[in-house]
Amino acid sequence: MTYFYTTNSWTSQPQISENQIEFWKNLSDKKNWRIVQLSNGFYQTEYKSKDENWQDVTRRETIESAEAAIDGSIEHYKKRLDFIKGPKVVKTFE
């Protein structure tokens, strides 16, 4: 049996495209999200894409859990945007 594997190493962080950054900015703004109720009673979270179409993301049983999912997604993408600036110093020693 043959195994194939690959490794990568960078001397700096991988560069993120401008399109990806714009996508994350769009998803980190709550005005670009909505919740719709489906015919089966579930609630679906959706975000507005660049071309003004709504893209479905998740389905939840309650409107509260759907909004919590949106809030969690917003926080996730805000963190990604924050880390584009580079590593954060979390502790220093003297």
Image: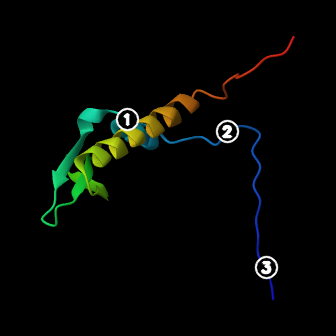
Amino acid type of the residue that numbered disc 3 sits on in the rendered structure: Tyr
Amino acid type of the residue that numbered disc 1 sits on in the rendered structure: Ser
At 77% from the left and 59% from the top, the residue drawn is: 7
Give the vertical position of 94 relative to 65 (above or below).
above
Mark 3 lies on residue: 3
* Residue 24 shown left or right of residue 49 in the figure: right
- Which residue ends up furthest to the left in the rendered image? 39
- Between disc 2 and disc 1, whose residue precedes? 2
Mark 2 lies on residue: 13
Number of marks: 3
Quarter holding the C terminus? top right
The one nearer the camera, 22 or 77, is: 77
Give the vertical position of 33 relative to 91 (above or below).
below
Mark 1 lies on residue: 28
Whole-number angstrom distance, CA of label 3 to CA of label 1: 40 Å
- Which residue ends up furthest to the top in the rendered image? 94
